[in-house]
Amino acid sequence: MKKLILFMLTAIQSVLACAQNNSDQPYLTKSFNAAGIKNVRASTSGGSLTVTGGTVREAKVEVYVRTNNSRDKSLTGEEISTLINEYYDIDISTSGDELKAVASPKKNINWKKSLSISFKISVPSEISSKLNTSGGSILLTGLTGNQDFSTSGGSLNLKTLSGKISGKTSGGSIHITDSKGTIELKTSGGSIEAGNCNGTIDLATSGGSLSLQQLQGNIKARTSGGSIKGNSISGELLSHTSGGSIRLEQLSCSLDASTSAGGLHVSFTEAGKSVKINVSAGSATVALPKSKGYTLDLSGGRISAGTMNNFNGSVEKDRVKGTLNGGGSDIYVHASAGSVSIDWK
């Protein structure tokens, strides 16, 4: 019986200690009058940054702290405060129209004593931000303004933004939805997903794949090592991969697409003024509405263009050039080593 009581007391103490260091609860919360706040500047060396815009009277900054040493997960709040006071400077304040939330180390820290300090910030929607973290993710929601943000190792998650949006990560993925404006996003090693966005959009990854859904505007989507998939895109699209395949459906845009090492399949509901496709090592298949007018320039190891009524030009095994239905959208498709197929819908 004594052993059972001792076990239960030990368990309760462990639960209480963990609760004091529960990363789901803020270590510190500060509130400010939201009137007049137009800018947010936030940085931290190891945690995540979250900025949420809305109709608020008070701007709020919540600080979340966890230990990086797995053996010290049960540190008490008092012990964490001691580590922060000794090794970190945390500045949460306002100056003019700027709200600042900065966590920085005072000196070199033994990794066993290091902390992950994250900020969750609630502000009016109409603000601009400048954000940086060395190792955590960045989440932005419901903001209108200029957003400039970067992380060295985390992901970027972005929703319902408008304005000038510029973000980069050195090793994480990017996900953006329901946003508009001038959007420029880059990652050195992760994938990119973009959905229901419009404007001038520039997406680039050095090693991941691209997924594009319901985009409208002037769009660039490039990857050095992954595949590209897209659906329901209008406006103008430049799409390039150095090491994967390209598959694009339900396009109503001008297109400049190329792949150095994979195949390509694109399907148009309506082709834009110009369609330019280059495939270095695979085959290309292009689906087009049959009733429209086109100016065709097709070349490859083998050309399959089906039945083309009202065609004026030359048809050879490896080259097709001429006009269909009196001419129209310029369709240039070149496959260096594979075949070219035109599917008429």
Image (cartoon, rainbow, N blue to C red):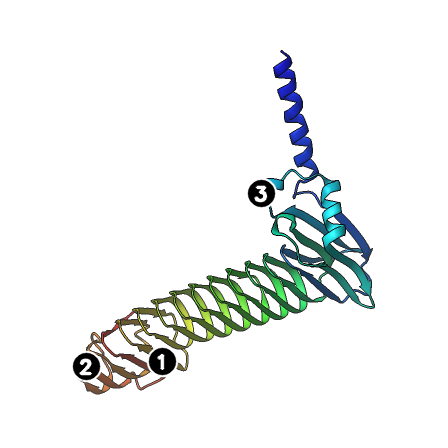
Considering every residue shown, the one lying at the far top of the view is 1
Compared with 14, 132 (above or below) is below
Q: Position of residue 220 (x, y in %)?
A: 47, 74
- Measure the C-alpha gap from mark 1 to mark 2: 17 Å
Numbered label attached to residue 276: 1
Please tell me whether mark 1 sits on a helix, a strand or a loop.
strand
- Measure the C-alpha gap from mark 3 to mark 2: 63 Å
Q: Which is more foreground, mark 1 or mark 3?
A: 3
Q: Is residue 27 visible to the viewer in this orientation of the structure? A: no
Mark 3 vs mark 2: which is more N-terminal? 3
Q: Nearer the viewer, residue 32 or 236?
A: 32
Quadrant, the C terminus: bottom left
Compared with 11, 84 (above or below) is below
Amino acid type, mark 1: Lys
Q: Nearer the viewer, residue 64 or 60?
A: 64
Please tell me whether mark 3 sits on a helix, a strand or a loop.
helix
Q: Nearer the viewer, residue 169 or 46?
A: 46
Amino acid type, mark 2: Asp
Q: Position of residue 25 (x, y in %)?
A: 69, 43
Residue 178 located left or right of residue 336: right
Compared with 321, 54 (above or below) is above
Circle 2 is placed at which residue position? 318
Residue 184 located left or right of residue 123: left
Residue 132 located left or right of residue 300: right
- Measure the C-alpha gap from mark 1 to mark 3: 53 Å
Residue occupying the point 42% across, 72% down = 252
Circle 3 is placed at which residue position? 70
Mark 1 vs mark 3: which is more N-terminal? 3
Q: Which is more foreground, mark 3 or mark 2?
A: 3
Residue 253 located left or right of residue 96: left
Residue occupying the point 36% across, 72% down = 242
